[in-house]
Image: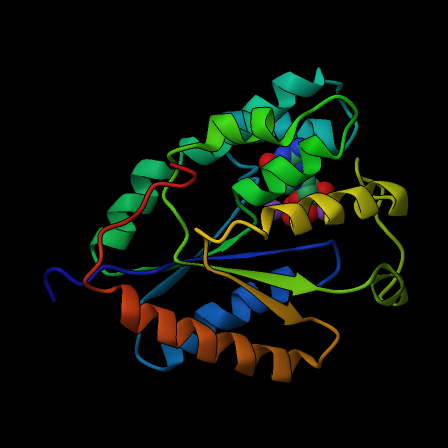
Amino acid sequence: MAGKRGALIVLEGVDRAGKSTQSRRLVEGLRAAGMRAELLRFPERTTEIGRLISSYLEKKSNLEDHTVHLLFSANRWEQVPLIKEKLNCGINLVVERYAFSGVAFTSAKENFSLDWCKQPDVGLPKPDLILFLQLSTSEAAKRGDFGNERYENTFFQEKVLQCFHHLMTDKTLNWKTIDASKSIEDLHDEIKSIAEKVIQKVQPKPIGELWK
Ligand code: DGP
Ligand code: NA
Ligand code: NA
């Protein structure tokens, strides 16, 4: 139907909170309910920029911290034409990680201000909903060990979490914090019901611009 756009729904949260599982389940659940929905995730490792990022995360290469921040942002911008096209033709997008991970992970490093970190992502399509999957560091630890990628340690993740909490104080964005210690099914039901309400509400509204 002309004029009805899809919603941009972002899932954020600390590692092992269940973002991948829940993003996938949400897309499946929306489709089962007769809606159009697709999954995106950042970093999108398959593009040229994504391959540079992937090699950095796997510690196969080193990149200067400002440089890698800008590459993560560029990796989001390169998907913007596709994101807008899909939303405008009525497809709901479920996105695993977005600019908030971008800001949280770099500003957790020494000598990076939150404000500097936000600038490259200013103007990205604004999410209609940001679901923050909240899980304490001790609960996350029960779900298994970290992998071997860069950033995968408790000390750094604690700092990342603090940055996320700061970003969540922004009342111009539709943050919803979800208790991710629940079962996969309960979490899915909660997320799906929040998402469905947002999808109904945004249909007549234009796509916003993030942090603008
Ligand atoms: P994932 O594929 O979701 O496991 O994410 C890869 C790692 O990269 C994870 O530790 C989070 C981190 N990350 C995701 N997005 C960004 C970003 O924009 N900037 C930085 N510095 N790190 C990010
Ligand atoms: Na990871
Ligand atoms: Na990701």
Question: What is the x, y in percent for residue 33?
Answer: 35, 82
Q: Residue furthest left?
A: 2
Q: Quadrant of ligand 1?
A: top right
- Residue 74 visible in this rendered orientation of the protein: no
Horizontally, residue 124 falls left or right of residue 60, namely left
The image shows residue 73, relative to residue 89, as above or below, that is: above
- Residue 14 visible in this rendered orientation of the protein: yes
> Quick one: 173 or 5, which is closer to the camera?
173
The image shows residue 196, relative to residue 137, as above or below, that is: below
Question: What is the x, y in percent for residue 44?
Answer: 53, 40
Residue at image x 37%, y 76%?
197
The quarter of the displayed image where residue 23 is located: bottom right
Residue at image x 58%, y 52%?
169
Residue at image x 59%, y 52%?
168
Question: What is the x, y in percent for residue 85?
Answer: 25, 46
The image shows residue 155, relative to residue 205, as above or below, that is: above
Horizontally, residue 203 falls left or right of residue 189, namely left
Which image quarter is the N terminus in? bottom left
